[in-house]
Amino acid sequence: METVEMNSVSLKRPRSEDDVANADEIKRQKILEKSKAGNDSGQSIENVTEQPEDTKSEIIPNEESEEQEEEELEDSDEDGDPESFADMMKHGLTESDVGITKFVSSHKGFSGILKERYSDFVVHEIGKDGRVSHLDDFSVPVDDEDPSEETFTVLSDEDKQRLEELQLFKNKETSVAIEVIEDTKEKRTIIHQAVKSLFPGLETKTEDRDGKKYIIAYHAAGKKALANPRKHSWPKSRGSYCHFVLYKENKDTMDAINVLSKFLRVKPNIFSYMGTKDKRAITVQEIAVLRITAQRLAHLNKCLMNFKLGNFSYKNHPLKLGELQGNHFTVVLRNITGTDDQIEQAMHSLREIGFINYYGMQRFGTTAVPTYQIGRAILQNNWNEVMDLILKPRPGAEKGYLVKCREEWAKTKDPAAALKKLPVKRCVEGQLLRGLLKYGMKNIISAFGIIPRNNRLMYIHSYQSYVWNNMVSKRIEEYGLRAVPGDLILKGATAVHIEEGDIDNYTIHDVVMPLPGFDVIYPKHKIGEAYKEMLVADNLDINNMRHKIRDYSLSGAYRKIIIRPQNVNWEVVAYDDPKIPLFTTDLDKLEGKPLPVLPTDGKFRALKMEFSLPPSTYATMAIREVLKMDTSIKNQTQLNTTWLR
């Protein structure tokens, strides 16, 4: 799954040890004071940063009031206090912890701030046809069968509330009656259209009651009707899927889809997309939705914050994960310290050679218990260890309710008691505790299975990524940036070894390395043996990667070890105000906003860079190669990082 990156990263050189120690003590005191005062800031433990498909839609059902309360809790301190965030990150991972140790370029590194503003990181999806997604058109396709604009205003707020409760089976009523004021055939038709289009799953009929006309709304086909919009209400000549471009700011893809679902009163699973995009960025991507009109979608532009929908079209197919060619990135690194020569060398190297295709830090979680350790325990079939790693107390500041939950678990090993300490039960810890409550402590496998499948698989994929990162670092150290006999290359979808006589036909850009699994082959040189040794050290058999639970069997895959970005461009600009944008977004262009006039000799310098990457590659790893700096949050904190929110 392709991904975009995480939080603001300031890459600076360290101060003196005394300064750092004093600053650490001040931060520690502030955190202690805040925790005593009940200020539960920080970040949730198991929030793995790559968003899986359908993670939100697979959540264990709760009462709506509980879900709303949890959302408020999560939103209230989502980013956390910078002090406690920094304290937590001291117990996180560095790049070397996950095998990220090598660079391919020879230039001298320099400092810069990545994501000082989320608008400094813009991602445009590249479709399978090579077209870059842009939001540049708000117009709605003309369709004679679309309801009139009055459809959206004819129902009162009270009517909408009652209809929504009926639609979602939230009360015992089997129908809702709406009195037709100013009765005319046209007025009744508009109300019929409004109910059917705004509340999928409901049908309508007209009745006379005491000399007055009423529109009666009722369920047509039980609970399935909500997930499956009515077929007969959709024109046959129109494609079943409305495709549109989603422009979003500071929201991840699944959160955005959940918001759209809520406003449209439909299930999230009628949306499809080619890839997920992370939160802290401006992203532009294509979305498809089943049997929702462009007119209804466009209406959301009037009421949604940080979203815009446009470029509507009707097609006969949904979108599929992984169908994209990649992403085009526009990135600003602010307050850079490099000389013009250093920057030129760095960017030329990125364009000509590329960067090591490491899995980025967000693949491994952000806390003292890395996701790959949980993945390794799953593969070892060590379920007590899996449970312990997820639930045990861990160093570093985190939300107070999680700390209390872990303490209760360590003290009592009682799922019910620990769950009572946890107001947000949709997190991984809450889901596992519910599973233990349901299935008992002797059936951890079933309890763990309550966690959404994609989250469970993310743990074992994290372990595969951990192995791959370590092996590619060994490969670069051992053989450098040239193809050697015994390396692997792909012919079509099949991996083959490079033979001595063919070595001149290949370069380092052709070489792939395997993620461990039962359906891959390994290099025929020292690195092949290194794979086996690493897995033996982890009590795993490289020749038996099938798990007794099918979901956790790893087939493996191949991944290029060096990626050369396409469409690389860069520019150094001067600026005085750190808050001003340094380029225009799609929305700026649509709204006619001019780019701020920049000084020729400002107080600060920024590197504006653009490049395109294929799916499953990490932009932070390309930026790491340019700056020659450890991108881990822990390392930046230790270097007196300023975490700008």
Image: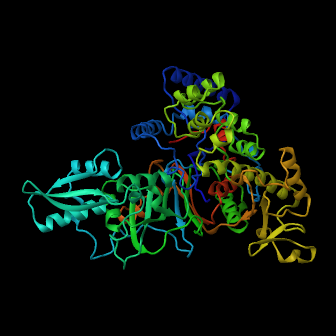
Q: Does residue 371 appear left or right of residue 424 in this picture?
A: right
List x then y, in percent, for residue 182: 8, 60
Q: Can residue 116 be seen in this view?
A: yes
558 to the left or right of 168: right
Residue 57 x, y percent position in the rendering? 49, 51
Q: Quadrant of residue 523?
A: bottom right
The extreme bottom residue here reads 237
- Residue 301 vs 311, above or below: the answer is above
Is 436 positioned to the left or the right of 98 in the image?
Answer: left
Residue drawn at (21%, 57%) of the image: 216
Which residue: 57% across, 35% down? 85
The quadrant the N terminus occupies is bottom right
Q: In this view, does 249 lie to the left or right of 164?
A: right
Q: Look at the image and tell me whether residue 306 can be seen.
A: no
458 w.r.t. 288: above or below? above
Q: Where is residue 327 in the image (x, y as percent from the top left)?
A: 57, 64
Q: Which of 503 and 570 is in front in this view?
A: 503
Please give the name of the residue rendered at 69% of the width and 67% of the height, measured from the top-left corner: 564
Which of the pair 359/95 is nearer the observer? Answer: 359
